[in-house]
Amino acid sequence: MFADRAKIYIRSGKGGDGHCSFRRELYVPNGGPDGGDGGRGGDLIFEIDEGLNTLSDYRHRRKYAAGDGEPGGKRRCHGKDGKDLVLYVPEGTVIKEAVSGKVIADMSGDNRRQIVLKGGKGGLGNQHFATATMQVPKYAQPGQPARELEVNLELKVIADVGLIGFPNVGKSTLLSRVTNADPKIANYHFTTLNPNLGVVDLEGANGFVMADIPGLIEGASEGVGLGHEFLRHIERTKLMIHVVDAAGTEGRDPVDDIYKINAELEAYNPEIAKRPQVIAANKTDLIYEPEEDPVERLKKEFEPKGIRVFPISGATGKGIQELLYYVSAELDKTDRTPVVFEQEYFPEDELIYEELPYTVTVEDGVYVVEGPKIEKMLGYTNLDSEKGFAFFQKFLKETGILDDLEAKGIQEGDTVRMYGLQFDYYK
């Protein structure tokens, strides 16, 4: 069974707790604290597997968790890091936060591997908390908690050209003729229940990837029939070949068919409806002495609007080469960069809005910011990366920490300390 959607629960690993212990050995005076640090929790990672083409692996198992970090031990022993968990998905999979529907990651293009949930940082052992005035610290830091999310996985086909049209107009036949794809073909509605992809090779012209996408019916944009199962897969295509039954063997009017399907595209996503189209007037071998030539009728209706009409026969192959070379030339005029959905949901943003306490104090002219809110942020943020530092600045601003520092009288050039992090303040 083709599976192009799944809902799963994912969790990163919890950081191991720091250890609280003291060195006690014969002939070793003043042994002092020797509690080791906890291990880092495992990351939850998504990675593209070229050998996959469905999400069926995620239909039966719904919960995935990376390994937890082990706690630290005595004699400064560091806890073992938790094992990362890599979830393999087919190229074109979009990962969305289940409640908001916002995109977390689009596994396509250059994005072959992405850490979606970072593991919790291990807690520090009590050896780190010894000072001149506190030589017997009986406190060790707990590990950062795990992070969890419920996500929707959606597979959106990656193809340059999408074959659209009502069911049973000959899309699968056309695909099987021009590519190496082997779709199921029969004379009944909804033969195609999942997208079929094939590569079109043209002599003397650039080839392209073509997808035969499940047939549309009226009301598809509201989910009638295959509905969104169809429409989701056309979002990445650069150009659409609109296949119609010019002979009217199903008793439908080809001109009316095109208007109905374009109305469904417009209702689903107006941006998709504006993409280039070409009409393939199929089944011309079945046209017998009509009162009015349906192909000429299609040309009169749509070519003044800039949509070319090509009479073809999927059964005999007539007119198909002209159609393919025209499509290749039109694709050369477009930006062939794959459509990649931008990230809209950032799991680390939850740290900003989480209601955890913090304090801002002044010690010997240094502004000290501490508390669970700061600890958690530092545990999950890589300040060495550009993205991590940008998040750090956003965190300071949106949590009100900058306002609190200014209320304490901070001036440009003054020093701010947050646990192990120290920096000069500049507006």
Image (cartoon, rainbow, N blue to C red):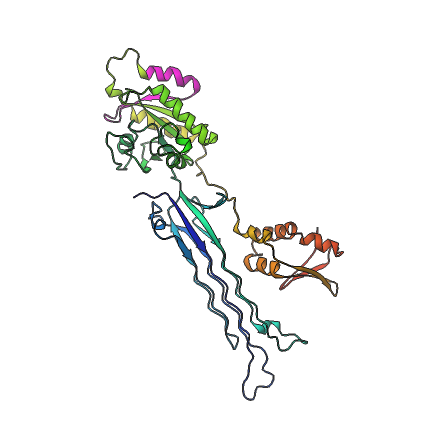
Specify the farthest residue to the top: 291
Q: Where does residue 399 sit, x and y in percent of width and height?
A: 64, 52
Q: Viewer-proximal residue, 367 or 407? A: 407
The answer, for residue 275, to whether it is visible in the render is: no
Q: Quadrant of residue 281?
A: top left
Q: Tell whether 19 sits left or right of 265.
A: right
Q: Where does residue 269 sit, x and y in percent of width and height?
A: 46, 32
Specify the farthest residue to the bottom: 27
Q: Is residue 319 above or below residue 69?
A: above
The answer, for residue 374, to whether it is visible in the render is: yes
Total number of numbered discs in the rendering: 0
Q: Tell whether 28 sits left or right of 188.
A: right
Over which residues does the magenta segment extend? 295-318
Q: Where does residue 88 sit, x and y in percent of width and height?
A: 38, 51
**Was residue 297 drawn as part of the magenta stretch in this picture?**
yes
Residue drawn at x 46%, y 56% is 11
Q: Quadrant of residue 139?
A: bottom right
Q: Tell whether 5 sits left or right of 124.
A: left
Q: Is residue 10 above or below residue 96?
A: below
Residue drawn at x 65%, y 50% is 397
Q: Viewer-proximal residue, 19 or 222? A: 222
**Was residue 183 drawn as part of the magenta stretch in this picture?**
no
Q: Tell whether 174 sits left or right of 95.
A: left
Q: Where does residue 244 sit, x and y in percent of width and height?
A: 32, 24
Q: Viewer-proximal residue, 388 or 363? A: 363
Q: Quadrant of the N terminus?
A: top left
